[in-house]
Image: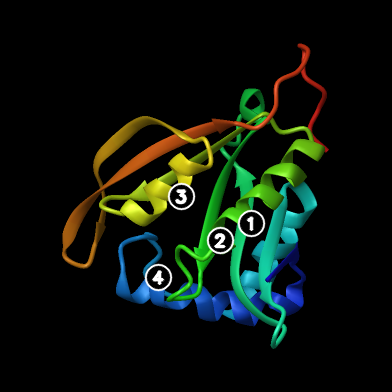
Amino acid sequence: MKVRAATEGDAAACAAIYAPYVTDTAITFEIEPPTADQLAARIAAAERTHAWLVLENLEDSRVVGYAYAGPYKERPAYRWSCEVSIYLETGLRRTGGGRALYEALFARLVERGYRTAVAGMTLPNEASAGLHRALGFEPVGTYRRVGWKHGRWHDVAWMQRTLAEGGDPPVEPR
């Protein structure tokens, strides 16, 4: 498997990976799967300010996962922090692909000047919590009953990880 920067041409593959998470789970709180065009716009926006990476199967050059970062919050004081997410094709958990994607994503974010990554996960989701713990994320809190999907309320746990330390004031992210 190979990790590389996403292009808008990867949008259809990313949409296909994401759709079952939207329709069949509460892992994401989106209700309708986004179209390839919508994901192309998300990829372009992430690449401008943060990063969007894909995991490609070398045997058939097929995209089988992706990870991306975006703003944590819009207010200026948060600009060195970002929110990260990762999605793998069904059946690819515990294969090392998630770790490879996230490690490459974190390196790119550090290059761009980001200091902290946060991740939210709908509970229960031990696979995601385990991956995040293994990559150095620490729990920081849980929002109780904040999302309604599939006929019930869901909690969201938040974790954070330091990406980089440095002198203060920090250099502006680029």
Q: Residues within 10 Å of mark 3 (few under 14, many from 20)?
A: some
Rendered location of residue 148, percent (x, y) = 24, 57
For the residues marked 4 and 1, what is the alpha-carbon distance in whole angstroms? Answer: 21 Å
Residue at 68% of width from left, 71% of height from top? 1
Q: Quadrant of residue 46?
A: bottom right
Q: Which residue type carries mark 3? A: Leu
**Considering depth in this image, is 100 or 122 the residue closer to the camera?**
100
Q: Contact (CB < 8 A) between labels 2 and 4?
A: no
Where, by quadrant of the figure, is residue 59 drawn?
A: bottom right
Front position among marks 2 and 4: 2
Residue at position x 53%, y 81% in the image? 16
What's the CA distance linking mark 3 and mark 4?
17 Å
Name the spot of residue 18 as percent of width and height, x first: 49, 72
Helix, strand or loop at label 4? It is helix
Q: Residue furthest left?
A: 152
Precedes in sequence: disc 4 or disc 1: 4
Q: Which residue is mark 1?
A: 100
The residue that disc 4 covers is 21
Per the image, the residue denoted by label 2 is 96
- The disc labelled 2 sits on which kind of residue? Gly
Q: Classify 166 as above or below 1.
A: above
Q: Residue at label 3?
A: 131
Dot 1: element: helix
